[in-house]
Amino acid sequence: MAVRLKSREIILFVFAFVALKTFCFGQAASLGAAPATAGSIHGTIVDQSGAVVSGARVALTREDQTARREVISDAGGGFSFAGVVPGAFLLTIRAPGFATQTYSGELPAGETQTVPLLALAVAENITEVQVGIPRVEIAEEQLKVEEHQRIFGAIPNFYVSYAPDTVALTSQQKFKLAWKTVIDPVTLLMVGGAAGVQQAQDHFEGYGQGAEGYGKRFGANYADAVAGTFVGGAILPSLLKQDPRYFYKGTGSKSSRFLYALASAFVCKGDNGRWQPNYSNVLGSLAAGGISNIYYPAQDRDGLGLTFENAGLALGSGAVTNLMQEFVIRKLTPKRDLNKP
């Protein structure tokens, strides 16, 4: 009898072990080395006394005022733009009570540029009320970074946030992330590979052999991926107002990070920023297993027994994947949010 895991977990779980093996043998650098043209810009905003200014709006544009992006300086006055196209750029900084300031520079291809300290002068006459960037826009900028995160520059690593102040996703953004995951070419490649292995081992023998048997196995595996990703990563998180991503810790002792990674399979951040039981992951694993009983061969449908067994294995593999995310995968993901060292 074949035991089935949620396909999204299988894909990341398999590649995580490949990544670990490659990393341990010192091959990550050669495999991950891909020519990069985009760079990054970061800096710190202070006032004239040298005190940091948090909550300032920093706009990045080309000198011709195209391709505008905005972020808000964090509690330490820092800001960062990742994936910036090389060339001339202009920074415009606005903060309540301070005069608007600009800074222009040139970003070489593939480089990280730290701009000098940007000291804001107190405004002589305050004639406008500054309004912060809507949270949905901040979430969209962070999501764009996550959608470019790939292990070795190829394997999707979308469901992890490296930003220190991640904003909750809207329901639309959760569905967008799920859709991007299931249509990714690497997802399709892994589904096809899993179907080939199943056919070679004659798993789900009710599907038969030949092209027809392979097609049925591919369809079943892909249906698992779609169901698992959308139910556990979009539908339930939207209904329960939970965030489906893993939030990289990166600080503290190794034991605290180890326990944090394991616990993240069972607890998650709510859209309100508070930690809570990860009902979306647990119920999503159960729902995906139940849905799969619709299209798998009759002899491979064992009702609740197999459904709960698959859900348990999915949760276990998710915990192992979180450990890989915390200690290994970040080093192998070239495009990531640079707000965190």
Image: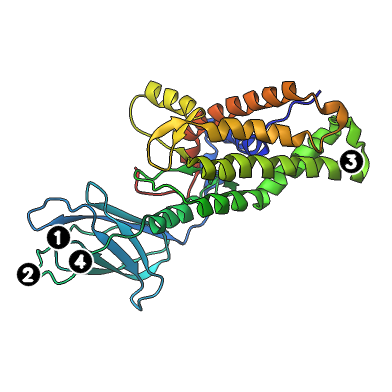
Q: What element does badge 1 sit on?
A: strand
Q: CA distance from mark 3 to mark 4?
A: 65 Å
Direction from residue 33 to residue 96 in the image, left or right: left
Q: Are marks 1 and 2 in contact (CB under 8 Å)?
A: no
Q: CA distance from mark 1 to mark 2?
A: 15 Å
Q: Earlier in the sequence, mark 3 or mark 4?
A: 4
Q: Earlier in the sequence, mark 1 or mark 3?
A: 1
Closest to the observer: 19 or 167? 167
Residue at the spot of label 3: 213
Tag in front: 1 or 2: 2
Report if the CB atoms under discs 4 and 1 are less than 8 Å apart.
no
Q: Is residue 268 above or below residue 152?
A: above
Residue 97 lies, in percent from the top left, at 13, 62
Question: Of callouts 4 and 1, which one flags the residue occurring earlier in the amino acid sequence?
Answer: 1
Given the image, on which type of amino acid does mark 1 rest? Answer: Ala
N-terminal of the pair, mark 4 or mark 2, is: 2
Front label number (1 vs 3)? 3
Disc 2: which residue: 124
Q: How is the image coloured?
A: rainbow
Q: Amino acid at mark 2?
A: Glu
Which labelled disc corresponds to residue 129?
Answer: 4
User: For the residues marked 2 and 3, what is the alpha-carbon distance in whole angstroms?
Assistant: 76 Å
Q: Residues within 10 Å of mark 3 (few under 14, many from 20)?
A: some
SS for dot 2: loop
Question: What is the distance, in whole Å, between disc 4 and disc 2 at their CAs?
Answer: 14 Å
Q: Tag on residue 119?
A: 1
Q: Earlier in the sequence, mark 1 or mark 2?
A: 1
Q: Residue at x 33, y 76 (%)?
A: 63
The residue lying at 50 percent from left, 37 percent from top is 329
Q: Say left or right for 89 vs 14.
A: left
